[in-house]
Image (cartoon, rainbow, N blue to C red):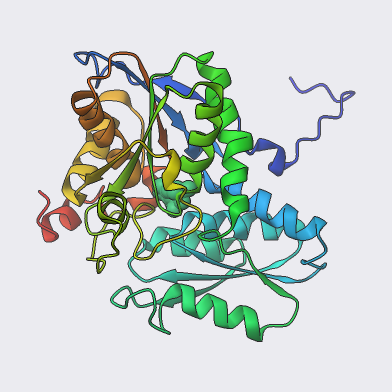
Amino acid sequence: MIKTDTQIKIDTLDLIGNTPLVPLDKIGSDLPAKAFAKLEMYNPSGSIKDRLALGLIENARRSGQLEPGGTVIEVTSGNTGIAVAMICAIMGYKALLVMSDKNSEEKQSMMKLYGAELILTPHTVQADDPRSNYSVARKLAEEIPDSIFLNQYDNPANIECHYQSTGMEIWEQTGGNIEAAVIGAGTGGTISGVGRYLKEQNPAIKIIAVDSEGSILSHYYRTGKIARAEHYEVEGIGSDRLVKALDFSIVDDMITIPDREAFLTARGIAKTEGIFCGGSSGAAYAGVLRAITKHRLSGTIVTIFADSGNRYLSKLYSDKWLMEKGYK
Ligand code: PMP
């Protein structure tokens, strides 16, 4: 029974972070190492990006760049947009989000339900094209008065958010007993912030990034050259341009996962562990499996499940879609 004499006020923003870290015991029962996943779908808007959106908007508000009633502009693969939309709804700002049309309809609907305006850009164009999501967002920020462009891809505060929250939480939740962290890279903010924090505590911890096949990131990591991006379906990881939020200096290895492996692994996690996660989480766990073999890991490995499968019911969790794409 609720005690009426006790006033409990919990702000939605207080629910951001402090997500659970769970062992992946069943799916990994025969592995030489023990993997744990940090379940970021437990953030209030449903993904790891609540941490980032709150950090970037708070910075802009405190520095006076964002005034009451102002417009927050951001380029997103969906989750940052949803998080920005939620926080703008709470704080009374307008949210204007720019996203490639490859990202799921579920994500588009979520941004709109929080009251944000969404502009879709064609996924077929390269990053330097004026029609790309980044070019469109930058132009809008120049044109719209009282607006700020958060620019998660090039903002050093992206790394800082994960250094202060995600990295510290992982260190505390594991009691510092970690051999490796295997984390998907999109903007690169999560792996860079978490990796920096963990390496400061113990430089022996291996930081392994997971990239999508078709993205430019792992090719750049291996060769120092920027290739032309190819299309890939997994959402949230991979990039078609080099970004400042990815600090390659803390990355010990980069593992590339094709779409099919990411999607089938995510479905396997639901069936064995009862965890309903997105395609990037499937890629992250596929990366854990490859890292165990490649780096002969035998201790504790931490990975991050960035969001929930309910954002992809019409995609990787649809048999019809999987078959149409030739993944099944
Ligand atoms: N997975 C999903 C589903 C995401 O939305 C993102 C964010 N782009 C990531 C992984 C990667 O996080 P980061 O941008 O911090 O590299």
Residue 106 visible in the snapshot:
yes
| Tally of marks | 0
What is the quadrant of residue 270 in the picture? top left
Residue 94 left/right relative to 222: right
| Residue at figure coordinates x 52%, y 16% from the top left | 176
Image vertical order of residue 63 relative to residue 306, above or below: below
Residue lying at the far front of the rendered structure: 224
- Nearer the observer, 216 or 166: 216
Residue 218's spot in the image, x, y percent?
A: 28, 51
* Between 101 and 227, the one nearer to me in the picture: 227
Res 167 quadrant in image: top right
Q: Is residue 47 something that shows in the picture? A: no
| Image location (x, y in percent) of residue 161 | 62, 44
Residue drawn at (78%, 59%), measured in percent from left and top? 61
Q: Is residue 310 left or right of residue 197?
A: left
Q: Is residue 135 above or below residue 40?
A: below
Q: Nearer the viewer, residue 279 or 299?
A: 299
Q: Quadrant for the N terminus, please.
A: top right
Tell me where residue 287 sits by quadrant.
top left
306 versus 116 height, above or below: above
**Residue located 81% across and 68% down the image:** 67
Q: Measuring from the top left, give residue 198's x and y in whole percent.
A: 51, 27
Tell me residue 58's x, y (percent).
Answer: 74, 53
